Image (cartoon, grey):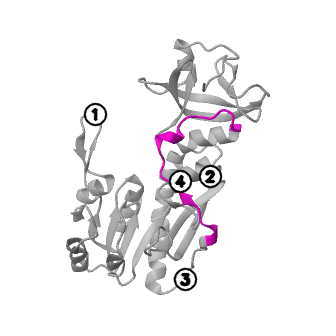
Amino acid sequence: MNLVFMGTPDFAVPALEALYKSKHNIVGVFSQPDKPVGRKQLLTPPPVKEFALQNGLSVYQPNSLKNDVSYELIKKLNPDIIIVAAYGKILPKDILDIPKYGCVNIHASLLPKYRGAAPIQWAVINGDSETGITIMKMSEGLDTGDMILVDRTEIGENETSAELFDRLAELGAVSLLKALDMLENGSAEFISQDDNISTYAAKITKALSPIDWSKSASEVHNLVRGLQTWPCASTIIDGKEFKIHKTVLSLKTGNKPGEIVDNKGMLTVCCGDGHCVDVLEIQPRGKKKMDIKSFFAGNKLELGTIIGE
């Protein structure tokens, strides 16, 4: 098939690479415009654009698809199908209607659960035991289109959203090629989503970062895992803010929420349900991330100290 690929971040690159190596013909790659990055605000191309240019693919970066110029461009490319993976822009109906096979989206959840911007993070934050990839035919609604294929995968107890992100990106590439074969050979079945059981995965913001130690140890641990690598969970210790990068579930003590119950080479903190978490990696404001042994080499925390206040 002749196809147009639309994607922007790292998540979309494995799918684009799989298509590039497949029998299909990529007639154009659409990505969001370059953005300033870092302290020096250097204009930086998104990962999808970088891959496309490295492999001789034509790249387009319109500010909007909701105009005649974008419509005429895509119509001229004449794709059989448009593949969308974390593109970050809404496709208007006139573009959705251009390809023979329509527009297909790679979504990182088991739809209709976690429609929206941050399905991977919320699956981890909510402590889900499994997630997956849904390949769906796009409609005008937000992730509401008919499902073509669903591939499931378990979420590890200590797996972070960053680790899951990488796994789902690879799974998405595999799932996409299977779905394209199904569309080509006519075996694809389009399954409607049940809107009554849908959930929304809102955009992740820094407001989620502060740890509420009155919550259960599992909830705290899941927040730490889910907010990797941005914006990261955080807490206050002796009036200073620290990012908490890695935890594991620990013993049950019944101490007060936020109370340090072990400081002998391990930072163990009690949570609201009496269970604890061990903090394995921590980052003081303005400094690099460090393991807890390195942290204790330059910092002393007294037993019984209440953190997060």
Give the image location of residue 166, x and y in percent: 48, 51
The residue tagged with tag 2: helix, strand or loop? loop
User: Which numbered tag is attached to residue 189?
Assistant: 3
Q: Which mark sits nearer the N-terminus, 2 or 1? A: 1
Q: Which residues are magenta?
A: 196-217
- Taking the magenta stretch, the answer to whether it contains residue 262 is no
The residue tagged with tag 1: helix, strand or loop? loop
Mark 2 to mark 1 CA distance (whole Å): 35 Å
Q: Which residue is mark 4?
A: 120
Q: Which mark sits nearer the N-terminus, 4 or 3? A: 4
Give the image location of residue 58, x and y in percent: 22, 65
Dots 2, 4 in contact, CB < 8 A: no
Mark 1 to mark 4 CA distance (whole Å): 28 Å
Task: Determine crowd level at label 3: few under 14, some 14-19, many 20+ residues with C-alpha closer than 10 A.
Answer: few
Mark 1 to mark 3 CA distance (whole Å): 49 Å
Give the amino acid at mark 3: Glu
Q: Which residue is mark 2?
A: 155
Q: Is residue 190 above or below residue 286?
A: below
Mark 4 to mark 3 CA distance (whole Å): 25 Å
Task: Determine crowd level at label 4: few under 14, some 14-19, many 20+ residues with C-alpha closer than 10 A.
Answer: many
Question: Is 284 left or right of 5, judged from the image as shown?
Answer: right
Dots 2, 1 in contact, CB < 8 A: no
The residue tagged with tag 3: helix, strand or loop? loop
Residue at coordinates 66% horizontally, 29% vertically from top-left?
A: 278
Q: Which mark sits nearer the N-terminus, 3 or 2? A: 2
Give the amino acid at mark 2: Ile
Q: Which residue is mark 1?
A: 39
